Amino acid sequence: MFIVVWKYTVSREKRDAFQNAYGKNGIWSKLFSTSDKYQGALLHQSMEEANTYFIIDQWVSQADYDHFMLNHNDTYQKISKLLEHLYDKEEKTGAFELVK
């Protein structure tokens, strides 16, 4: 399994909209779900800082993720631009592979 982890800072008034867009049935999951190699995303809200979220995107492998991103880059960029008003800060914290 391969994952990509993102960290977001979201203002109080935009939390609901952010959760809808980035949650299990949001626009990102709909885009990624067009690939059978996408295994879902987990959206977590910090218990200590309610304006902090982590998203863990799960893929079968890094090659599958890279292939998807290469073939869907235009759509990805459009959605990213469309949704950037929903957060104050976005940070890719890393990409990880499951240790067997």
Image: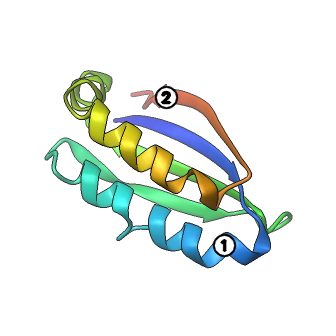
Find residue 32 and report its horizontal and vertical position in percent.
27, 49
Disc 2 + disc 1, Cβ < 8 Å:
no
Query: What is the secondary structure assignment of the residue under circle 2?
Result: strand
Q: Quadrant of the N terminus?
A: top left
As displayed, is residue 55 above or below residue 10? above
Q: Nearer the viewer, residue 62 or 12?
A: 12
Name the mark on residue 54: none
How many other residues sit within 10 Å of disc 1, few (<14), some (14-19) or many (≥20)?
some
Q: Residue at x 57, y 67 (%)?
A: 18
| Real-space Cα separation, disc 2 to disc 1, in angstroms | 27 Å
Q: Residue at x 77, y 74 (%)?
A: 12
Query: What is the secondary structure assignment of the residue under circle 1?
Result: helix
Relative side of 99 to 10, left or right: left
Name the mark on residue 15: 1
- Mark toward the viewer: 2 or 1: 1
For residue 13, what is the image quadrant? bottom right
Q: Residue at x 28, y 29 (%)?
A: 61
Q: Of marks 2 and 1, which one's residue comes earlier in the chain?
A: 1
Name the mark on residue 96: 2
Find residue 23 and report its horizontal and vertical position in percent.
46, 67
